Amino acid sequence: MPQGKFSAPKPGKHHNNKLHVKKGDTVIVNRGKHKGATGTVLFASPEDQKIVVEGVNIVKKHVKPTPGNTAGGIDEREGAMHASKVQLVDPETGKATRIRKTIVDGKKVRVGAQSGKTID
């Protein structure tokens, strides 16, 4: 166990609350049964390192009837997946790319590692 000022992260929580993707980015899934699928990030949770990608990881959710939804039933919706399972799509080439962060005009921007083009 670390001593002093720094301590271990809490169980179930990630120690670095940063993601390489954000809402609205186009990504390619590179792991799991949806490998190769492309979609837009609908939701990003840096605390849990999870994202929701449009049209990927469809799960069935049983919904109880409510005054707004009197029928209830089984809904199909996108499930969350770990952010490490996706890569950003390079706007120049349309392929998956790693990113690096550089400062341009006093702002930190994401740059595609292969093409060198800014993504933000």
Image: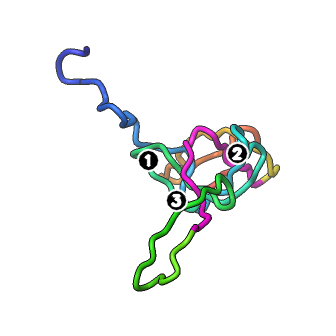
Chain part drawn in magenta = 74-91
- Quadrant where the image shows the C terminus: bottom right
Q: Position of residue 78 (x, y in %)?
A: 60, 59
Image marks 2 and 1: residues in contact by CB distance under 8 Å: no
Query: How far apart are the two marked residues, 2 and 1, measured between alpha carbons?
Result: 18 Å
Name the one closer to the observer, 104 or 48. 48
For label 2, the residue is 29
Classify 10 Å Cα crowding around label 2: few (below 14), some (14-19), many (20 and above): many
Q: Is residue 39 above or below residue 96?
A: below
Amino acid type, label 2: Val
Give the residue displayed 52% in from the left and 59% down from the top.
43
Name the one closer to the observer, 35 or 47. 35
Name the one closer to the observer, 50 or 73. 73
Q: Label 2's element?
A: strand
Amino acid type, label 3: Phe
Name the one closer to the observer, 23 or 58. 58
Q: Position of residue 49 (x, y in %)?
A: 47, 43
Q: Position of residue 59 (x, y in %)?
A: 61, 56
Residue lying at the far left in this picture: please name it: 4
Classify 10 Å Cα crowding around label 3: few (below 14), some (14-19), many (20 and above): some
- Quadrant where the image shows the N terminus: top left
Image marks 1 and 3: residues in contact by CB distance under 8 Å: no
Q: Label 3's element?
A: strand
Asked whether 75 falls inside the magenta stretch, the response is: yes
Image marks 2 and 3: residues in contact by CB distance under 8 Å: no
Quarter of the figure with residue 2: top left
Task: Indicate how the structure is coloured in the image.
Answer: rainbow
For label 3, the residue is 43
